[in-house]
Image (spheres, helix red, strand yellow):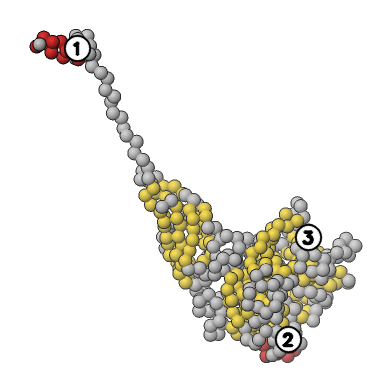
C-alpha cells in the first residue's frame, strides 16, 4: 500500500523532477502605464478693463503629467450687459467691454469649470462725443458740443437725400450732392466744407438706375457705402482705388449701418411686431450678390408697424433703433456670441423720450463715441416742445438711459432759425 502511494506521488511530480528538467519561465514584470487625467481648467485671472477694451481669453487644461494644452470649451457669462462674447464655443474667444459693472466669465470642458470676474470701469464724464454734422436747406450744419447754435455752410450744391458720413478720425466728410443734374459723392475737409472734390458720379448715361440716395456709412477700411432707395442698389466708393462698385440691395431697405467687423446691417421700410427688424448682410463682389442673416426682431410694444427711422452701431457693436413715430430707443447687442441679438436680455428699451406717440417725427439717430446717441426729432401733429436734437446716454451704468440727466436736449436752435437737419452724423 505504501509503495503504491509513492508511485502515485512520483507520477504526479514527474514534470520538473528529473535531472534535465527546466523550471517554468516566469514573466518579468514591466512598468505599468499610468493613465493621464485632466486635473484642472484655467482661463486666466480676474480682469479690470475699460469701456471698449477687447481682451482675448483661452481655455487651458492641465493634466496629471503636468502637460498644459489649449482645449475647446463652452463659454458663458452672468450677468449680461457688461461684456460681449465673440463666440460661445472654442479654444479662444474675445470679450468686448460694453457697460460698466462686473460679470463672471465661465468656461467648461469635460467635467471641469473655470471662472473669472471681469470688471469694467465707467466712462469718464468728459469723454469726447466727437463732432456732429447735419444737412439742411442744401447746406451743411456743424453743431458745437456745448449746445450753442450750429454753423451753416452752403457748399454750392443741393443735398437731395440723407447721404452723409464722416471718417472715424474726422479727417473726411462725405456728402451726396445733386450737382448739375447728377448725383455725386462729394469729399471735403470737415473744417472747410466749401472746398470739396467730386469723387464719384452716380447716375447719368452710365448709371441711370441710381435714384433717391438715402443712407450712407463708412467701413473700417474707409470705403463709403451709399444706399439708393428707388434704385434698389448699394454704391461702394473706394477712395484708395478711386473706383465705385454697385451691389443689389434687399427690398424695402430703409436704414443701414456697419458694425466693427464690417458687417453691414439693414432695417426694412416697415416691420410688424416680431418680424425681422435688423438684418446682417455679407457682400460678395465677385458675384455681385449678398447673403442675409436675420439679426433682430421688431419689438412688440410699438403701435402698428415699426418704421425704423434710424439705425446706428456704436464702437462697442451696440445697435440703436427707433420707430419714426415713437418715443422709445431700443438697444440690440449680441451678448452670447451666437450671431444674433434675439437672445434673453439682448434687446431692451434703452430709453423713453418725452411726449407721446406721433408727437414728433424721428429724422434719424447717430451713435457717439462715449456710448450715447443723438436723436433728431422734428415737429409732428402733437407737442412741438419735443422738437430738437436729444442726447441719450447711460451715465449711471445701469444698462439703460432712463435715469436722471440721461435724456437731455442737446440742441434746439434749428427750431428758431429754420435749420431742420435731414440727418445727423458723428464719428465712431
Where the N terminus falls, by quadrant? top left
User: For residue 205, what is the image quadrant?
Assistant: bottom right
Q: Residue drawn at (75%, 83%), measured in percent from left and top?
A: 420
User: For residue 145, what is the image quadrant?
Assistant: bottom right
Q: Residue drawn at (30%, 29%), measured in percent from left and top?
A: 30
What kind of element bears circle 3?
A: strand
State whether residue 358 is above or below residue 15.
below
Q: How far across and how far down the image is residue 276, in percent?
A: 67, 67
In the image, 411 versus 4, the foreground residue is 4
Residue that mark 1 sits on:
11
State whether residue 225 is above or below residue 418.
above
Q: Residue drawn at (37%, 49%), measured in percent from left and top?
A: 39
Q: Mark 1 packing: few (<14 Cα in 10 Å), some, or many (20+)?
A: few
Residue that mark 3 sits on:
248
Q: How far across and how far down the image is residue 323, in percent?
A: 68, 77
In the image, 18 versus 133, the foreground residue is 18
Between disc 3 and disc 1, whose residue precedes? 1
Residue that mark 2 sits on:
380
Amino acid at each position: 500500500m505504501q509503495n503504491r502511494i509513492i508511485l502515485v506521488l512520483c507520477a504526479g511530480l514527474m514534470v520538473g523532477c528529473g535531472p534535465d528538467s527546466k523550471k517554468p519561465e516566469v514573466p518579468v514584470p514591466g512598468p505599468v502605464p499610468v493613465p493621464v487625467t485632466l486635473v484642472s481648467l484655467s482661463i486666466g485671472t480676474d480682469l479690470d478693463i475699460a469701456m471698449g477694451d477687447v481682451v482675448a481669453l483661452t481655455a487651458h487644461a492641465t493634466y496629471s503629467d503636468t502637460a498644459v494644452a489649449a482645449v475647446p470649451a463652452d463659454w458663458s457669462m452672468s450677468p449680461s450687459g457688461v461684456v460681449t462674447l465673440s463666440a460661445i464655443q472654442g479654444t479662444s474667444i474675445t470679450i468686448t467691454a460694453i457697460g460698466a459693472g462686473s460679470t463672471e466669465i465661465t468656461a467648461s470642458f469635460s467635467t471641469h469649470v473655470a471662472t473669472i470676474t471681469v470688471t469694467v470701469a465707467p466712462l469718464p464724464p468728459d469723454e469726447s462725443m466727437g463732432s456732429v454734422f447735419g444737412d439742411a436747406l442744401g447746406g451743411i450744419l456743424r453743431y458745437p458740443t456745448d449746445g450753442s447754435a450750429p454753423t451753416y455752410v452752403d457748399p454750392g450744391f443741393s443735398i437731395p437725400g440723407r447721404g452723409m458720413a464722416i471718417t472715424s478720425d474726422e479727417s473726411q466728410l462725405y456728402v451726396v450732392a445733386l450737382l448739375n443734374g447728377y448725383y455725386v459723392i462729394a469729399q471735403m475737409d470737415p473744417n472747410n466744407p466749401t472746398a470739396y472734390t467730386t469723387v464719384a458720379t452716380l447716375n447719368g448715361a452710365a448709371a441711370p438706375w441710381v435714384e433717391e440716395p438715402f443712407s450712407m456709412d463708412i467701413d473700417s477700411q474707409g470705403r463709403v457705402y451709399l444706399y439708393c432707395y428707388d434704385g434698389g442698389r448699394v454704391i461702394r466708393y473706394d477712395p484708395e482705388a478711386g473706383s465705385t462698385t454697385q451691389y443689389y440691395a434687399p427690398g424695402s431697405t430703409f436704414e443701414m449701418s456697419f458694425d466693427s467687423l464690417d458687417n453691414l446691417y439693414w432695417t426694412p421700410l416697415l416691420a410688424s411686431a416680431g418680424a425681422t427688424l435688423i438684418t446682417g448682410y455679407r457682400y460678395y463682389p465677385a458675384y455681385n450678390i449678398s447673403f442675409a442673416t436675420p439679426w433682430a426682431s421688431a419689438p412688440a410694444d410699438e403701435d402698428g408697424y415699426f418704421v425704423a427711422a434710424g439705425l446706428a452701431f456704436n464702437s462697442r457693436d451696440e445697435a440703436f433703433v427707433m420707430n419714426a413715430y415713437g418715443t422709445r430707443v431700443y438697444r440690440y447687442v449680441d451678448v452670447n456670441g451666437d450671431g444674433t441679438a434675439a437672445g434673453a436680455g439682448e434687446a431692451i428699451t434703452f430709453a423713453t423720450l418725452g411726449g407721446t406717440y406721433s408727437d414728433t417725427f424721428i429724422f434719424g439717430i447717430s451713435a457717439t463715441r462715449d456710448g450715447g446717441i443723438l436723436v433728431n426729432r422734428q415737429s409732428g401733429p402733437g407737442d412741438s416742445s419735443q422738437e430738437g436734437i436729444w442726447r441719450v446716454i447711460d451715465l449711471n451704468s445701469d444698462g439703460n438711459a432712463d435715469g436722471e440727466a440721461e435724456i437731455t436736449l442737446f440742441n434746439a436752435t434749428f427750431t428758431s432759425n429754420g435749420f431742420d437737419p435731414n440727418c445727423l452724423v458723428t464719428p465712431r
